[in-house]
Image (tube, rainbow, N blue to C red):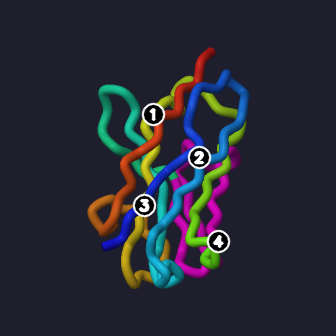
């Protein structure tokens, strides 16, 4: 069983930055594609960013392009998302996810096998 634990969320003012970390309890994490999703209050979960197993390919939602950066460290079994120039509309619960034995980027939620419990990000104006 693969467990994912997000950390790094919290309150931040508009224009500020936050770095989220997802720690994965799987030694073969390098065989998993990974991604970040978010669920704003009262809305459905939405895709934010994805990264391939090697880290060589990334893909972003339009809302994240130019502001967010996803990365991973397969030695430390971690996935990161650096979020800059945050806006109030970025307020959401952020989830990391892993897709087993997928070497490409994955942008569709139901194609992920494992999910973290989420971490709250609140951006105030």
Earlier in the chain: of badge 1 and badge 3, it is 3
Circles 1 and 3: CB atoms closer than 8 Å: no
Q: Would residue 82 appear left or right of 92 to someone viewing this image? A: right
Neighbourhood count class around disc 3 (C-alpha, 10 Å): few under 14, some 14–19, many 20 upward: many
Give the SS element for disc 3.
strand
Looking at the picture, tell me which residue is in the foreground, 47 or 8. 8
Q: Would residue 113 appear left or right of 77 to someone viewing this image? A: left
Q: CA distance from mark 2 to mark 4?
A: 21 Å
Q: Position of residue 100 (x, y in %)?
A: 37, 78
Give the SS element for disc 2.
loop
Q: Which mark is residue 73?
A: 4
Neighbourhood count class around disc 1 (C-alpha, 10 Å): few under 14, some 14–19, many 20 upward: many
Image point (36%, 70%), residue name: 2
Earlier in the chain: of badge 4 and badge 1, it is 4
Q: Position of residue 14 (x, y in %)?
A: 67, 23
Say whether residue 89 is magenta.
no
Of tags 4 and 1, which is closer to the observer?
4
Residue holding disc 2? 64
Give the SS element for disc 1.
strand
Q: Quadrant of the N terminus?
A: bottom left
Residue holding disc 3? 4
Give the SS element for disc 4.
strand
**Above or below for 120 versus 109:** above
Circles 2 and 1: CB atoms closer than 8 Å: no
Q: Position of residue 95 (x, y in %)?
A: 43, 49
Earlier in the chain: of badge 3 and badge 2, it is 3
Say whether residue 68 is magenta.
yes
Q: Quadrant of the C terminus?
A: top right
Q: In this picture, which residue range is highlighted in magenta?
A: 49-72
Residue holding disc 1? 92
Q: CA distance from mark 3 to mark 2?
A: 22 Å
**Above or below for 115 versus 93:** below
């Amino acid at each position: 069983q693969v467990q994912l634990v997000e950390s790094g969320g919290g309150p931040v003012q508009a224009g500020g930055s936050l770095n989220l970390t997802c720690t994965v309890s799987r030694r073969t994490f390098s065989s998993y594609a990974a991604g970040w999703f978010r669920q704003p209050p009262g809305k459905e979960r939405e895709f934010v960013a994805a990264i391939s197993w090697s880290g060589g390919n990334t893909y972003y939602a339009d809302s994240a392009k130019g502001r967010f950066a996803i990365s991973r460290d397969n030695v430390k079994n971690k996935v990161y998302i650096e979020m800059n120039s945050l806006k109030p509309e970025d307020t959401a619960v952020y989830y990391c996810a892993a897709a087993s034995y997928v070497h490409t980027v994955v942008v569709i939620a139901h194609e992920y096998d494992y999910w973290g419990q989420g971490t709250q990000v609140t951006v105030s104006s």
